[in-house]
Image: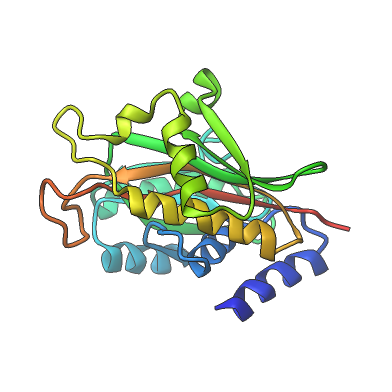
Amino acid sequence: MMTEIDNIISSALRQNRKTLSEWESARLLMGFGIPIAKGILAQNWDEVRKAAEGIGYPVVLKACSPEVSHKTEGGLVAADLRTEADLEAAFKRIRSATATVKDAACLVQELVKGERELVVGMIRDPQFGPCVMFGLGGIFTEILGDVTFRPAPLSEADAGEMIGEIKGHKILGAVRGMAAVDIDALVACLISMGRIGVEQEDIQAIDVNPLIIQDSGQDSGQNSGQAGRPVAVDALVILKGK
């Protein structure tokens, strides 16, 4: 897997790109053990249709290109598509909107259900080097700014402290009928993010937002009441460049 990661980064740098596509970003994160929503890259309608059938409805359809980073704001994401007709309409709309985007493809992704959204990431600070970020995600990232940072690499104790530091940490417990978050899995995500920062010097920053706490029992063999599993559903990797 590390060879694939090295190939993804070196290929992007050869093309003088500063960002990886969401597909490339997901492959990189998966290589470091970070749970990623199931997804299939598709180039045309027939591939999109077959991908949705393989994953199972409902699905999410996204534009996928290194040139496209703010998909939601650009209307390039269609969520909770429950039928082939829904999927085809979304595909035509997204394809039309990306007609001028070079090498635009589509990412068909499972719909990960969960009410709690977190953000994890990495930023390469000029003074402290690679630092891991953790906090409340989704729309609350910018509104509340409830995030914390630690220099990488992280120990289990470091990651545990970060999780307890955010003001909204109680949302990670068993609240409103939802199971508590799998803290061990969350700790592992933060440690892996630190590893990426230490081992991949060509990466300037990573933004995983949201990292959804998947509802117990959804397509994962879990039973109701078991710990909620963190799953990354959107990722952006920014390279240092030359």
Vertical order, 2 against 101 (above or below): below
Q: Is residue 164 left or right of residue 190?
A: left
The way the protein has been coloured in the rendering is rainbow
Residue depicted at 55% across the width and 41% down the height: 71
Q: Residue lying farthest top? A: 143
Q: Which of the 4 quarters of the picture holds residue 40?
A: bottom left
Can residue 95 be seen?
A: yes
Is residue 88 in view? no
Measured from the top left, where is residue 159 in percent x and y? 48, 46
Residue 193 in the image: above or below residue 116:
below
The residue at the far front in this view is 157
Task: Residue 186: give x, y in percent of width and height.
Answer: 39, 49
Residue at position x 33%, y 47% in the image: 183
Residue situated in front as seen by the camera: 21 or 164: 164
Give x and y (percent) for residue 105. Answer: 55, 60
In front: 221, or 77? 221
Residue at the far right in the pictured view: 242
- Residue 2 lies left or right of residue 233; in this view the side is right
Quadrant showing the N terminus: bottom right
Query: In the depicted view, which residue is nearer to us: 204 or 84?
Result: 204
Q: Nearer the viewer, residue 114 or 186?
A: 186
Horizontal and vertical percent for residue 239? 74, 55
Please give the count of numbered marks on the rendered protein.
Answer: 0
Residue at 83% across, 60% down: 16
In the image, what residue occupies the spot 18% across and 36% down?
178
Position of 53 relative to 230 (above/below): below
Q: Quadrant of residue 14?
A: bottom right
- The quarter in which the C terminus is drawn is bottom right
